[in-house]
Image (cartoon, helix red, strand yellow):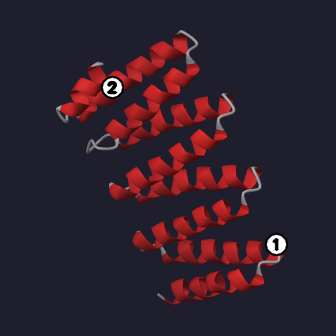
Amino acid sequence: KAGTAFSKVRNYSRAGESFRRAADCMLHASKNEQAALFAAESGRNYVKVADGEEKSSEAFNLALQTYVDLKKTIIADKLAIEAAKLFEGAKKYDRAIYYHDVASQSYKAQNKTPDYFRERKAISSLYINAQKWNEASKNYENIFIEMTNNGMDKNALEFGVQSIACLLA
């Protein structure tokens, strides 16, 4: 309740702290799903605080690990993408890339190829936003190679061109 009250009055630091404490209490009580919910909410609040990047990431990581342990990969994947978008909105591109990568690796493990490539493409876009042209090029090149190896030659061509364009930027 305290976390929600602090969030309503836009005291995101205190809200994040309250939700994190609630998550820890739920973990101690072996109520893991509830703990994951509170940890995710903690991350959502901390990401809005100027110096809350690290605490937000810790909270999201706790929630993601808890969902994975509970075999709730769909929820974990959605949360990873949500975290990525929140960090992207806060212009914390390295963290956004990290969470898109978490989602992409999960999709790859589940053989969800279109979702995997969508997340890889999002990572390249973030590299471009951060003006990390070499990293964007390398990521596009890897997508091109993987798609070619999977017999997706028509779709792969776009990424090969993108890789070259990034190198020229």
**Looking at the rendering, which quadrant does residue 117 occupy?**
bottom right
List the residue tagged with mark 2: 17
Looking at the image, which residue sits at the far top?
Answer: 29
Determine the CA span between mark 2 and mark 1.
45 Å
In the image: residue 111, left or right of residue 36: right
Q: Quadrant of the N terminus?
A: top left
Residue at image x 53%, y 51%? 99
At horizontal 40% and vertical 33% (from top left) the residue drawn is 41
Coordinates of residue 168 in the picture (x, y in percent):
51, 90
2 vs 1, front mark: 1
Mark 1 burial class by Cα count in 10 Å: few <14, some 14-19, many 20+: few
Position of residue 131 relative to residue 90, above or below, is: below
The secondary element bearing badge 2 is classed as helix
**Residue 13 position in % (x across, y down):** 26, 32
Circle 1 sits in a helix, a strand or a loop, which is it?
A: loop
Left or right position of 81 against 44: right
Whether 155 is drawn above or below 48: the answer is: below
Mark seen at residue 150: 1
